[in-house]
Structures are given as structure tokens and as C-alpha cells.
Amino acid sequence: MQITPANASDIPALCELLDILFSQEADFKPDYEAQSRGLARIISSPEVGLVVVARQDGQVVGMANLLYTVSTALGDRVALLEDVVVSPSVRGSGVGSRLMEHAIQFARLNGCKRITVLTDRENESAQRFYQKHGFGFSAMMPMRLSLSE
């Protein structure tokens, strides 16, 4: 298995993974056009973030995406870890852990002082997965205002 930065030709396979993820998340729904547009923006703009993919036998089987911003509290770059998803056919084989290790390492190498990840409240398996990789619960509660529609 290889972990590499995504490229534009990976977008259709990444959209398939996002379909799986967004079908199980309460706040989102699959939208191929929107997903393609968002992925293209990240992949073509390294200052915005990074999408990493796990490839097995040449096929994309997992992805994770880091988006960057600046924390005034820390006075430095931080990252939001989004869209961590592994194909159901390879779950439990360590692909997700390898993606996480790579994403964390890349964030460190690029000066990030913190990584934040959001999960559905009911997704206890995802919460256990992130805790296994050093994430802890925050006293902060996410709130969202949708500006679309």
C-alpha cells in the first residue's frame, strides 16, 4: 500500500469514497459536482490544504484531507482534518491508521500546531479511532451556520 498526495485524476475515486462517508453522516449528503469542485480546489492549491490517498494495487482505497487556517490563540497554523474515509473492502486492515499517521506527520512538517477533527456524535467507532491516534474531546462545541441555499 502507498500513501501519496492526491492528484486531479483521483477525483472520481475520491468522490466515490465521499459518497460512502456522506451517506453515513447526519449533516451532509453526497453531491458529486460539489465534491469534485471542492477536491479540485484543494488539490490545486497546496496553501489551502492537502488530500492524501491510500492506494492498493493501483486503486484508491482511502483518503484524508487537511485544511489549513491560522489560530489566533496559538498564533500559528492549524489544520482541520476532514473526510477521513476508507473503502469498506479494506477496513480493519490498517489503511485508516496509515492515512492518519501520514496526515499527522504532514501537518507537523508544515508547521501546524493543532489538528481538529469533527465526527458525528453517534459515531463511537470513529471517536475511538481518533482517540487511538491521540485526539481527545474538546470543551468546545461545534456550531454551524449554513450560508448556502
Image (cartoon, grey):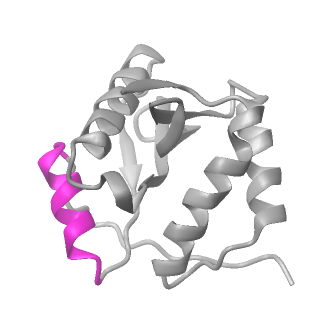
Left/right placement of residue 69 relative to residue 56 reads right
Q: Residue at x 55, y 58 (%)?
A: 17
Quarter in which the N terminus is drawn = top left
Q: Nearer the viewer, residue 47 or 86?
A: 86
Q: Where is residue 41, by image quadrant?
A: top right
Q: Nearer the viewer, residue 74 or 103?
A: 103
Q: Is residue 59 above or below residue 125?
A: above
Q: Is residue 46 above or below residue 36?
A: above
Q: Nearer the viewer, residue 127 or 68?
A: 127
Q: Residue at x 60, y 78 (%)?
A: 28
Measured from the top left, where is residue 16 in percent x and y?
62, 60
Q: Residue at x 21, y 49 (%)?
A: 135
Name of the residue lying farthest toward the top:
109
Residue 131 counted in the magenta span: yes
Q: Is residue 44 visible?
A: yes
Left/right placement of residue 37 relative to residue 105 reads right
Residue 53 counted in the magenta span: no
Measured from the top left, where is residue 125 in percent x and y?
20, 69
Q: Residue at x 42, y 22 (%)?
A: 106
Left/right placement of residue 9 relative to residue 87 reads right
Name of the residue lying farthest toward the front:
57
The residue stretch that appears in magenta: 122-134
Q: Is residue 71 visible?
A: no
Q: Which secondary structure class fits the magenta region best?
A: helix
Measured from the top left, where is residue 146 in percent x and y?
71, 78
Quarter in which the C terminus is drawn = bottom right
Q: Where is residue 27, by image quadrant?
A: bottom right
Measured from the top left, where is residue 34 in percent x and y?
80, 63
